[in-house]
Image: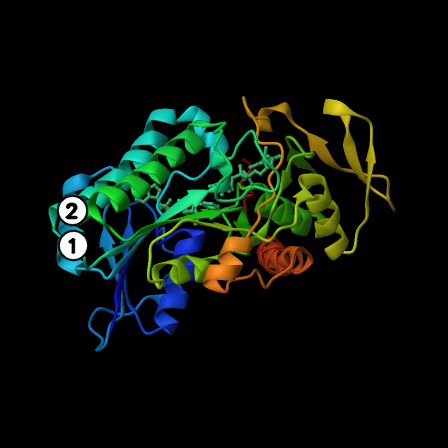
Amino acid sequence: MKRALITGITGQDGAYLSEFLLKQNYEVHGIKRRSSSFNTGRVDHLYQDRHEEDVRFILHHGDLTDATNLIRIIQDVQPDEIYNLAAQSHVQVSFETPEYTANSDALGTLRLLEAIRILKLEQKTRFYQASTSEMFGKVQETPQKETTPFYPRSPYAAAKVYAYWITVNYREAYNIFGCNGILFNHESPIRGETFVTRKITRAVARISLGLQETLYLGNIDSKRDWGHARDYVRAMWLMLQQDQPDDFVVATGETHSVREFVEKAFEEAGMRIRWEGTGLDEVGTDENSGKVLVRIDPRYFRPTEVNFLLGDPSKARQMLGWKAEIPFEELVRMMIQEDMKEARKDQLCREEGFQTFNHFE
Ligand code: NDP
Ligand code: GDR
């Protein structure tokens, strides 16, 4: 039985990858941070009581900023594969916490690679690094592929460029089987609530049930190549099953604007949006009632923005036999359907007299 260690197991990708690896009969170990409140909501359905027999899902407390802790966990687990998914992954937040972002996202990757080296696991342990299309930033070529030069536009992207190159360097210097998956945006019903897609689908569901008045957004003309996380974790695993380590772009090959995402999400909830005005005064109104449902809030603009991303997944298709299965329209539909359920729960609570709160960010 193969053993995998996932950092960032409590995040969106960690949850999908855990499900995938358990189905492949792996023993799955994960690193979770200590938190003052429960933070395992995305993997609770996979949790097994430690007293059961044949436990294949095991969590360890740890943090990417703590080298001794990482060395100890890796020594105990002796993993065949490490998936480094842990990161301060929010681009806008990285402008507020640049040093912490570099510590966890850049140096955290170095700490894991050093742990493999210190423990002499170079021949045993394969390493996946969660690299990102944000490294292309101010794009130098379209569509973006493995050879496109990087031009990071945020502390997050700059930290991820370091992590990318240190993975390549440890591969070349010490023969570690290290792969970079350069993943373009991927979403799902369990996407973090403050990324734009989930922020939109949650708000649209709540607006359609009368639980929220307005959705506030930043740059709605920004374009992204959005896929579904379930498809993308399969690509991570495929990379580590090859004969040679390599780096791969993982994308759908289609791009859509935030504006289009908003339109599609409202459409799925049975409403149509009409855009009026320009710049900061632009609003999205309900075509039927004329009510303003979307407004622009300058707080959500970034000091430097990545305006456009479109990936070329040809190499992954040819060498890994991978392709995105879930199209954009279905992704939006799935996210709206799940957020409608969440909003209905909230509505029921309110009808029964319980107080509920919405989180705005
Ligand atoms: P999430 O933000 O959903 O999950 C991040 C995970 O990292 C969480 O489990 C979080 O823990 C954990 N984490 C954060 N900081 C630390 C730390 N210092 N030590 C240990 N754990 C930490 O991200 P995604 O699942 O969406 O993304 C997974 C990875 O892929 C990230 O590295 C991201 O940068 C990268 N990526 C994501 C893309 C996407 O579109 N989703 C595209 C390309 C790359 P907690 O739950 O406690 O916060
Ligand atoms: P991104 O994702 O920065 O691409 O990083 P995000 O969903 O945060 O932003 C996408 C685009 O939407 C614009 N935008 C807004 N974004 C947020 N979060 N909130 C808003 O209100 C809003 N309004 C407009 C943004 O400016 C941006 O252009 C994600 C993360 O998962 C990274 O970890 C990952 O590496 C990349 O995707 C690939």
Taking the spot 37% from the left edge, 53% from the top edge, the residue there is 10
Q: Is residue 24 visible?
A: yes
Taking the spot 51% from the left edge, 62% from the top edge, the residue there is 322
Q: Which image quadrant: the C terminus?
A: top right
10 Å crowding of disc 2: few (<14), some (14-19), many (20+) = some
Residue placed most toward the observer, 112 or 292: 112
Taking the spot 46% from the left edge, 60% from the top edge, the residue there is 319
Residue designated by label 2: 117
**Count of numbered badges drawn on the protein:** 2
Instruction: Say which element carries label 1.
Output: loop
Taking the spot 81% from the left edge, 48% from the top edge, the residue there is 272
**Distance in Å between CA atoms under marks 2 and 1:** 6 Å
Q: Is residue 7 visible?
A: no
Residue placed most toward the observer, 313 or 173: 173
Q: Is residue 91 above or below residue 9?
A: above
Give the farthest residue toward the bottom.
53
- Amino acid at the residue labelled 2: Arg
Ligand 2 shown in quarter:
top right
Left or right relative to 42: residue 112: left
Rendered location of residue 349, percent (x, y): 57, 56
Rendered location of residue 73, percent (x, y): 17, 52
Instruction: Say which element carries label 2.
Output: helix
Rendered location of residue 163, percent (x, y): 34, 38
Q: Is residue 256 above or below residue 294?
A: below
Residue 121 badge? 1
Scheme by which the image is coloured = rainbow
Residue placed most toward the observer, 35 or 308: 308
Left or right relative to 43: residue 176: left
Q: Are marks 2 and 1 in contact (CB under 8 Å)?
A: yes
Q: Quadrant of residue 55?
A: bottom left
